[in-house]
Image: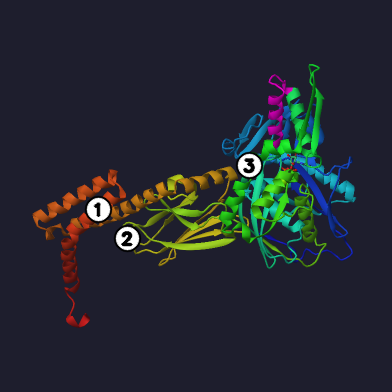
Amino acid sequence: MALLQIAEPGMSAAPHQHRLAVGIDLGTTNSLVATVKSGSASCLPDEQGRVTLPSVVRYLSDDQIRVGYEALAEQKTDPLNTVSSAKRLIGRTLADLSQQPHYLPYRFGQSGQVIELHTRHGLKTPIEVSSEILKTLKTRAEESLGGALVGAVITVPAYFDDAQRQATKDAARLAGLNVLRLLNEPTAAAIAYGLDNGSEGTFVVYDLGGGTLDVSVLELSKGLFQVKATNGDSALGGDDFDQRLFCHLLEQHGLSQLNEQDGSHLLALCRRAKETLTREPEALIETAFSDGRAFRATVTRQEFHDLTRHLVQKTIEPVKQALKDAGVSKSDIKGVIMVGGSTRMLHVQQAVATFFGQTPLNNLNPDEVVALGAAMQADVLAGNKSGGEWLLLDVIPLSLGLETYGGLAEKIIPRNATIPTARAQDFTTFKDGQTAMTVHVVQGERELVADCRSLAKFTLRGIPPMTAGAARIRVTFQVDADGLLSVSAQEQSTGVQAQIEVKPSYGLDDETITKMLQESMSKASDDMAARARAEAAVEAESLLGAVSAALKLDADLLGETELAAIRNDIAALEGRLKNGTAEDIRAATAALGASTDNFAAKRMNRNIQRALAGQSIDDI
Ligand code: ADP
Ligand code: MG
């Protein structure tokens, strides 16, 4: 969540000198490196001419490390020492992982907040694994460009939180790369399509990769790129299509007893057939199993589309949600950008086209587009290109707020607010003479603090003693360009202040965010009831406090029956507070209010008389 400002002052190079900079798409499934040569961006191929590098790292027995296609091919035979999907682990804790519905076959450990994997090379963090991928791409680029890189722009999903971004930067540093900037993947795609050149309006980036779907709504205006909302499914991607075809073949051919090796081989063939079907109307799957049995099947495109239509439909829900969160409708969308290898599938393109009622932008290679955009930005940042100054803004994924009396969450910065941002709100004390106040910072959409995520707590001390409700405490929430939240509280009359810095999204993955959002929607009515009750309770407690304080001072003003009636109503209200509904509490509060009306009037008279005593008429 960084504010990205391009074309920084003082970064322009001498005119004759071209500084070598690259863009890197560090993907879950595949990674790529691209650069701008003679004004146009292209991906750099390996020696065999392949531009994609499978994001797989294998730690071999002879201290060697292998990255890419070979590692991928060997994964099944050496799963514990061959790490794929490190992007799912980077910047996460084991606790975060337990909320992911993913099976990853590694032996996990954790040191501090960082996940570790036991490999034959010892403990490896996802940061180290990712750095191997980055090193491979760095070497490829330097060999191909014939010089050392001044830096790289590395892309990350728009929903990556601060910890995930920081970890990605660490991986780059470990690989010896100078990170010019982290760039959001959808923004990189938009840049690759040249949308930064004067395009205005709202765009959707639909990114279906190997294992994940990421949907982003971007708004472009006057050189400002803004991510309005993100949504997606971290457990839906091309792999699910392979799997579906694989299961279909097993059923169709009665292959229940395939051993693991035959199984993974057939799965790989299914993936290849899926990819063939985007170019050809049918694909042939032919192999021999380890027991010598021959296997042969033909799959038509139509058949494959029918088998996987439900998966395609499933990708539309997050699209709808993202539009809703961004507060736009389909008809507001000026263009839809297709990103990720899986958007090559024709029924995916059709479904997206039908949903939006327009042909998506897909003339750039969907698995290269993110790297190309990153390369274009790297070129600008390295000072090779003048002009083009864009501001790229991000949003906060969940509302930030604080706990108010009664366990209620008061939102200060709403979800999807653009960062950087600062908002302030005034609060007051609840009790007479209260000199300290605890500020409990929470994140989430729900009404009750108990249902939100607690981020931090701090105490403001030294509030001058005043009657309840008289102090003015201004609480300011500030989220900086890097997504870091700081909260400060200041008592307005004395200026005493306390503050704290928090990382708002630390360790929160999109899964959790989605879950929290879903809960907030499905439980909205429960929450309203809980909120109503909590509010009624706050009012009741405040009245009880005031009445008991008054009784201590001025009970002598009351006759015996009147005093008994008040005590009776106090007891009734206390009972309601324990187990009554909001309605009950309000009724009992009103009753106590009524029975103390006369008492309040008598006290007021007494206070006026006291105040007047010793003053001359002229003073009044
Ligand atoms: P990620 O962003 O997750 O690293 P990619 O964007 O590289 O992933 O997408 C990888 C996925 O794209 C894989 O599931 C792969 O099978 C799929 N893919 C690549 N080419 C094609 C194709 N021609 N047809 C269908 N799917 C494809
Ligand atoms: Mg990708």
User: Does residue 537 appear to the left or right of 220 in the view shown?
Assistant: left
* Image coords of residue 487 (percent x, y): 51, 57
Query: Residue 9 occupies which quadrant of the picture?
Result: bottom right
| Comes first in the chain, label 3 or label 2 | 3
SS for callout 2: loop
The answer to whether 211 is drawn above or below residue 187 in the figure is above
User: What's the residue at 34%, 50% (across, down)?
Assistant: 533
Mainly helix, strand or loop, the magenta region? helix
The answer to whether 268 is drawn above or below residue 568 in the figure is above
Q: Which residue is mark 2?
A: 468
Q: CA distance from mark 3 to mark 2?
A: 48 Å
Q: Residue furthest left?
A: 560
Q: Residue furthest top?
A: 291
Q: Which residue is mark 3?
A: 234
Q: Amino acid at mark 1?
A: Ala
Q: Which residues are magenta?
A: 240-260
Q: Residue furthest bottom?
A: 618
Q: Which residue is mark 1?
A: 587
SS for callout 1: helix
User: Does residue 537 appear to the left or right of 597 in the view shown?
Assistant: right
| Comes first in the chain, label 3 or label 1 | 3
Q: Residues within 10 Å of mark 1 (few under 14, many from 20)?
A: some
| Comes first in the chain, label 1 or label 2 | 2
Location of the C terminus by quadrant is bottom left
Give the color scheme: rainbow, by chain, secondary structure or one colour.
rainbow
User: What's the residue at 12%, 56% (across, down)?
Assistant: 562
The answer to whether 387 is drawn above or below residue 433 in the figure is below
* Image coords of residue 177 (percent x, y): 77, 49
* Image coords of residue 510 (percent x, y): 59, 45
Based on the picture, tell me whether residue 487 belongs to the magenta stretch: no
